[in-house]
Image (cartoon, grey):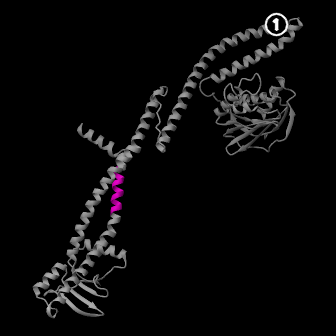
């Protein structure tokens, strides 16, 4: 149990955003320190050798103060030891005139000229000196910082220089670790307070809202921050408020739909009785009764149609679709014939549909879509309906237009909103909503293309059409 708890805390610390930020910060700081260390160690080696040049020159000054430019071997050894070199030579204008050396001079392994002109090479030489294990004696030649034109040549033990470089590297490493962890801790605490903590609050707010979206207390209270976190909080608050309003509206509509479905059954029964009575009124000999009876029958027909459309709209789930393959031109002609039989015989038609164009859809439901659109156009005052269809990509695009007066502005704004998109007096506002539901149930859609003084045009799309098998039969105009 203890191990499990420890591993859980470890994952919570380093598996989350805060732990990853901590690890990344330490890593990036260490990488930066390594990039800084490379030129630093090369510079340290350069300075070390330059100091040996300066110390060697200072040690040689004792010869100038001594009689006959000579000192004892003991003093000479002390001067060289303090300078950190094995020997010193001074040269001026290609002439060597002063020298300090030990009795047993070591053999020179390599010669270096200062200052180094190639920093890339100096960096490589510095790292090579760090990893080299054999002992070497370096002859270093450089201009004295104490006297211009004076060349100083010293013999340097590379092992002593390597020890100094390693000590410097360990100090740099220790300092880098301290800087890395201090920087990482500060960045970690800052990001945890500024980013991680607010993100956790956002996540907790979304979780609470998911569990109970209807509770207003679960809506996040946004802060007044002006950064992206504050913007995310405000956007989330607006989203939650809008979603709550939508859920509330849908729950009310669901309850209303259930009530309407029950009421609709009773209303249709009452209307059926009234329809039977109206048939008897038509047989009345009273002229006034015979005059108002057709208006009464039309009013009851509209009431029955309203009940039917409301029931269709209130039905739960998308409308069921039973697709089959059929010719689109035949469906349009059948719709025209039915409308002519229903009293729209004076309506003109312009059909531009390929005779062999077949679609795969629910024939009865697509028939209802065309019939509703044409009936709406005629009731709005249209005398001519234009229907065209073409294959586009993997689907069929159909356009149905009329020469009516167009839809009012308010009707266009609320075209597909239930009970709000009626474009004429007595309309239910459900015809286009149901038509869109039927098209979307097929995987297609319906949209308004244009509406104005020259008429109204709708575009309908259906997917998965079959290609044309015969040339288009276009330009046929007739009265249905």
Residue nearer the viewer, 340 or 146: 146
Q: Which residues are magenta?
A: 22-33
| Residue at image point 35% right, 76% down | 121
| Residue at image point 19% right, 81% down | 85
Q: Quadrant of the C terminus?
A: top right
What is the tally of numbered marks visible in this picture?
1
The residue lying furthest to the top in this view is 285
- Left or right: 16 as drawn, with respect to 133: right
Check the image and report above or below for 335 versus 76.
above
Name the spot of residue 92 as percent of width and height, x first: 28, 91
Name the spot of residue 107 as percent of width and height, x first: 19, 85
**Circle 1 residues within 10 Å: few <14, some 14–19, many ≥20:** few
| Residue at image point 50% right, 36% down | 236
| Residue at image point 43% right, 31% down | 208
- Left or right: 90 as drawn, with respect to 242: left
**Circle 1: element type:** helix
Residue 4 lies within the magenta run: no
Q: Quadrant of residue 353?
A: top right
Name the spot of residue 112 as percent of width and height, x first: 29, 82
**Mostly what secondary structure, the magenta segment?**
helix
Name the spot of residue 299 as percent of width and height, x first: 78, 16
- Left or right: 268 as drawn, with respect to 456: left
Q: Quadrant of residue 113?
A: bottom left
Residue nearer the viewer, 328 or 195: 195
Tell me the residue that label 1 is attached to.
280
Q: Quadrant of the N terminus?
A: top left
Residue 32 lies within the magenta run: yes
Residue nearer the viewer, 241 or 422: 241
- Left or right: 295 as drawn, with respect to 306: right
Check the image and report above or below for 60 versus 253.
below
């Amino acid at each position: 149990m203890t191990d499990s708890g420890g591993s859980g805390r470890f994952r919570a610390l380093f598996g989350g955003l805060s732990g990853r930020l901590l690890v990344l910060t330490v890593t990036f700081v260490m990488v930066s320190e390594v990039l800084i260390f490379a030129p630093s160690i090369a510079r340290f080696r350069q300075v070390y050798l330059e100091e040996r040049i300066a110390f060697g020159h200072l040690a040689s000054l004792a010869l100038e103060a001594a009689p006959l430019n000579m000192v004892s071997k003991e003093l000479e050894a002390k001067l060289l030891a303090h300078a950190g070199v094995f020997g010193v030579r001074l040269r001026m204008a290609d002439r060597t005139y002063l020298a300090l050396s030990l009795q047993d001079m070591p053999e020179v392994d390599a010669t270096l000229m200062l200052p180094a002109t190639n920093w890339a090479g100096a960096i490589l030489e510095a790292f090579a000196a760090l990893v080299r294990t054999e002992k070497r004696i370096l002859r270093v030649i450089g201009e004295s910082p104490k006297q211009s034109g004076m060349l100083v040549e010293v013999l340097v033990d590379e092992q002593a220089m390597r020890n100094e470089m390693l000590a410097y590297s360990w100090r740099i490493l220790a300092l880098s670790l301290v800087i890395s962890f201090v920087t990482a801790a500060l960045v970690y605490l800052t990001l945890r307070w500024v980013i991680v903590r607010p993100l956790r609050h956002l996540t907790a707010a979304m979780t609470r809202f998911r569990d109970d979206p209807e509770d207003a207390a679960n809506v996040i209270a946004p802060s007044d921050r002006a950064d992206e976190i504050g913007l995310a909080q405000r956007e989330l608050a607006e989203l939650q408020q809008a979603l709550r309003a939508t859920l509330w509206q849908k729950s009310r509509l669901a309850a209303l739909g259930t009530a309407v479905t029950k009421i609709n059954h009773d209303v249709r029964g009452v209307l059926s009785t009234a329809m039977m009575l109206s048939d008897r009124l038509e047989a009345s000999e009273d002229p006034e009764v015979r005059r108002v009876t057709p208006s009464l029958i039309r009013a009851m027909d509209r009431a029955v149609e309203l009940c039917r459309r409301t029931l269709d709209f209130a039905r739960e789930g998308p409308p069921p679709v039973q697709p089959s393959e059929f010719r689109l031109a035949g469906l349009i002609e059948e719709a025209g014939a039915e409308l002519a039989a229903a009293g729209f015989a004076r309506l003109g038609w312009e059909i531009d549909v390929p005779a062999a164009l077949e679609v795969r859809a629910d024939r009865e439901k697509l028939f209802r879509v065309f019939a509703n659109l044409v009936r709406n156009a005629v009731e709005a005052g249209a005398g001519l309906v234009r229907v065209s269809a073409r294959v586009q990509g993997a689907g069929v695009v159909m356009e149905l237009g009329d020469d009516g007066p167009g839809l009012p502005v308010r009707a266009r704004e609320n075209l597909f909103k239930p009970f709000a998109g009626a474009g004429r007096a007595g309309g239910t506002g459900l015809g286009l909503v149901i038509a869109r539901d039927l098209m979307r149930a097929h995987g297609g859609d319906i949209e308004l293309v244009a509406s104005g003084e020259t008429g109204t045009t709708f575009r309908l799309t259906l997917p998965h059409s079959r290609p044309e098998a015969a040339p288009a039969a276009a330009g046929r105009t007739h009265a249905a």
